[in-house]
Image (cartoon, rainbow, N blue to C red):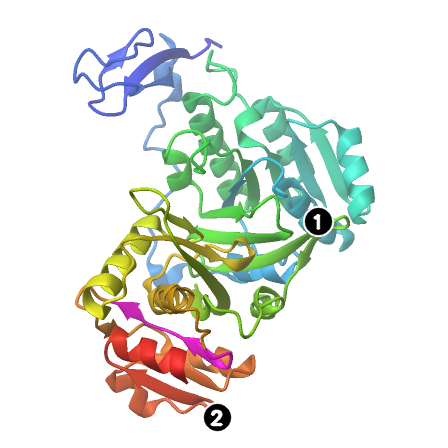
Amino acid sequence: MAKSQTRFVCQQCGSIQTRWLGRCPECGEWNSLVETPFPAQGARASRTPTVEGSESRPRQLSEISTDGFDRLSLGIGELDRVLGGGLVPGSLVLIGGDPGIGKSTLVLQACGHIASNERPVLYISGEESAEQIKLRSSRIGVSGDGLYILPETNLDVIIHHVQQYQPQLVVVDSIQTVYVNDLDSPAGSIGQVRECAARLMRVAKTHSIPVLLVGHVTKTGVIAGPRVLEHTVDTVLYLEGDRFHIHRLLRCVKNRFGPASEVGVFEMQDTGMIEVANPSQVFLAERLAQAAGSAIAVTMEGTRPLLVEIQALSSTTVFGNPRRTANGIDLNRLWLLVAVLSKRVGVRLFDQDIFVNVVGGFKVNEPAADLAVACAINSSFRDVPVASDIAVIGEVGLSGELRAVTQLETRLKEAARLGFKRCLVPQSRSLQRIKVPDLEILVARTLAQALEIALLS
């Protein structure tokens, strides 16, 4: 059989070149040519399907049955919750993260649980030998019964074994090490990653086998390879964390079978990844109640409310331009809050170095933490602590007003559950129907009013 030929297709204009060029000669776009397999001469007719004999046909939605598509539990509650309840048969899941963050450990633990229930699992290792995986499994307490290890990078061989064993789960660690013979480019290139992911997707959908892909990330923290990789898969997960902290956050950014933006919390221990059932208590465990420059924010990660401590430090600068440093929040958001504090509240921050940190290595992306950041900065500047029994929620506008946030009742119930007696929130109509036992709701219309309540209560 004739081998496929390779051409380079521009992702911008679609032009085809016989060799790779740094710049497309048709549209002038840089780095847009991607290696793509084309059928060899004489092979096109045999590879083109005919309408006669095709088994595919359109069906009414009411005729389609989902029997046998029960989710596959991975035995790790936090992982199952982030996935929306477990793995859907035939789904393609991509897990990315920094080197050494714990991706392979978490995946191996999940494989061990499925294999222990007498359901075979095929673990494809493109980076480690079988002996290395055995050493890790012994350390984290994973037995080898039902877990098949295949150190292989040739995708044709991998697909052959998948069809032969028909496992309950296939893991490819990692997708950047797998290659197909039809492309001459090395493994990990844009063309190879895209083609391998497409073929694995067809195998998963055809045999209803969930496939778990482990992916490398670039220095900017995104999945390495073409952007189409994240469009191809059904679910995209990122394992995040600071190497100097034991906590790891599994964040879902795309999920076709459940809610996106869910977050699972783990602790990295010698015995593997341990679930954190109540992360709010963990983030607040070492808090000094009467320390100036500390405030408690109630954030939402997907459907889960989390209480995190936000610390701020304000000190007189010794340079001409004051420094603004943010760890765990957006630096541009910090600049905005400093400007509002200076202009609308009258806090003299033009000669102050300001440092803001979210305790525990957690990253807060939603504006509902604005009020907590502002309270922490003002508390440090005035050297007056925020009341220890109060949590704060609210978005700060450019006019100094406080704006309502979503899922307020869920946030308030989580604050009450963790022992907070009061919660400072923006004024809104939805407060009339919210009743939370053992929690006093304090209302403020502007940032100035909120700061006065939080620091003088």
Q: Position of residue 285 (x, y in %)?
A: 62, 68
**Residue shown at the point (63%, 37%) measured from the top left:** 100
Was residue 389 drawn as part of the magenta stretch in this picture?
yes
On screen, residue 109 versus residue 259, left or right, reads right
- Give how far apart the Cα atoms at labels 2 and 1 are: 40 Å
Residue type pointed to by label 1? Gln
Q: Which mark is residue 109?
A: 1
- Farthest residue in the front direction? 318
* Front residue of 254 and 59: 254
Label 1: few (<14), some (14–19) or many (≥20) C-alpha neighbours in 10 Å? many
Number of marks = 2
Looking at the image, residue 2 lies above or below residue 175: above
- N-terminal-most mark, 2 or 1: 1
Q: Residue at x 57, y 64 (%)?
A: 283
Kind of residue at badge 2: Pro
- Residue 426 is situated, as x and y percent measured from the top left of the image, at 29, 79
Reply above or below: 317 against 129: below
Front residue of 385/351: it is 351
Rendered image quadrant of residue 435: bottom left
**Which quadrant does the C terminus fall into?**
bottom left
Name which residue lies at 23% across and 67% down: 346
Return the x and y of residue 146 as percentages of the image width and height: 77, 45
**Range of residues picked out in magenta:** 387-396
User: Who is closer to the viewer here, 310 or 93?
Assistant: 310
Q: Which residue is mark 2?
A: 437
As drawn, 323 above or below 132: below
Q: Quadrant of residue 220?
A: top left
Tag 1 secondary structure: helix
> Visible in this render: residue 356?
yes
Residue 367 place in picture, x, y as percent: 32, 63
Label 2, residues with CA under 10 Å away: few <14, some 14-19, many ≥20: few
